[in-house]
Image (cartoon, grey):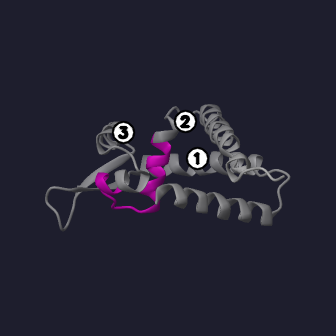
Amino acid sequence: MTEPVNELLPGETLHRLFHAYKRAMREGLHAANMPLPVSHMRTLKWIARTSGLTAQQIAAQTAQDKGRITRLLNELEQNGLIEKKPHCDDRRSQTLHLTPAGDALMDSFRTVETQIRTRMARGLSPKQIRDFATITGLMAENLES
């Protein structure tokens, strides 16, 4: 007799992986003297990837509350890591850009992130990593639709 599909899905394993990854990132950031929380670094990463995003766009893309994103962005701005500029098409909006200090921090973050990813993928083949990314991407899409 085969197990039901629900018993085969790795919910607990994904939960454990998520928390282990987040913990490793926190520890890596701490060791690299980057005191910002992982959530702040992830937001900086969004801005670095696509300069000129608005708070609304980040909230939509990360599926987070706009109020929470706004508070986080205000902290990043107060720390001199981002700057807000008027949106060219919408006077009510502001676009977000990294400052030189934000760029430098992102370079350090990328180093930490690469170290953590390398550690996480130790012992896995490139095919296994690709398959994992494909499968977890599909699972995320299933839950988001």
Q: In this view, does 142 lie above or below 64?
A: below
Q: Label 1 near label 2: C-beta < 8 Å? A: yes
Identify which residue, 140 or 41, lies in the foreground: 140
Whichever of callouts 1 and 3 sits on the residue coming sooner in the sequence is 3
From the viewer's perspective, is residue 73 above or below residue 93?
A: above
Residue labelled with disc 2: 34
Amino acid type, label 1: Ser
Question: In the image, is 8 to the left or to the right of 54?
Answer: right
- Identify which amino acid the numbered label 2 is placed on: Met
Mark number, residue 108: 1
Residue 117, disc? none
- Assign a secondary structure to mark 2: loop
Label 2 environment density (alpha carbons within 10 Å; few <14, some 14–19, many ≥20): some
Residue 58 position in % (x across, y down): 37, 53
- Residue 54 placement (x, y as % from top left): 30, 56
Q: Name the main secondary structure of what is drawn in magenta.
A: helix
